[in-house]
Amino acid sequence: MIYILAKTMGYFELTIGEVTAIMLYIRTIMNNTGSLTNNIQAVAKVFGSAYEIAVLIVKPNEIIYDGTKKPEEQEEANTDEPLVKVDNVKFCYPSKPDVPVLKGVTIDVQKNKIVALVGHSGCGKSSIISLVERFYDPKDGKMLFQSEDIKNLDNKWYHQS
């Protein structure tokens, strides 16, 4: 660029001040062009994110909530049977199907008992809760409530009076 300005300076009979002004103008234009490309990149990211969100909205739900059975009150005499049972559950998130999160977990939760899920980060505590709440279905094994697979339960039973 300096070579071109030196040649142009002789051809147009420019002073050093005019050449300096031209260099500063060129620098300003280059900085603004760089900022413009950053803004274009940000807009492109927004468009890409909007597309991914639209795909999620349009994508059919993998979990089918068409169970017809309603949970019944558990009798006090039948306390040997767990209220909630996680039975040999294997699970991996749909976004990472090759990374197993739960590898054959079994948990029994008795009525009126407190259960604590404790462990290091990434060991599956939140995944177990997500499966109980039926945000996901296990790949293998069963999630049982009162000995009934939660897939068979009506998910709106608690809204009825």
Image: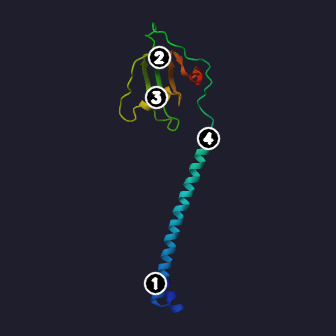
Residue found farthest to the bottom: 13
- The residue under label 2 is which amino acid type? Leu
Whichever of callouts 2 and 4 sits on the residue coming sooner in the sequence is: 4
Q: Which residue is found at the position 38% from the left and 27% from the top?
A: 117
Q: Which numbered disc covers residue 83? A: 2
Determine whether the residue tagged by mark 1 lies in a helix, strand or loop: helix
In the image shown, does 19 or 90 lie closer to the viewer? Answer: 19
- Badge 3 crowding class, 10 Å Cα cut-off, few under 14, some 14 to 19, many 20 or more, is few
Badge 1 vs badge 2, beta-carbon distance below 8 Å: no
Q: Which residue is found at the position 50% from the left and 72% from the top?
A: 30
- Badge 2 crowding class, 10 Å Cα cut-off, few under 14, some 14 to 19, many 20 or more, is some
For residue 54, which quarter of the picture?
top right
Q: Position of residue 98 (x, y in %)?
A: 48, 35
Mark 3 highlights which residue? 129
User: Please, is residue 61 above or below residue 18 in the view?
Assistant: above
Q: As drawn, is 69 to the left or to the right of 130?
A: right
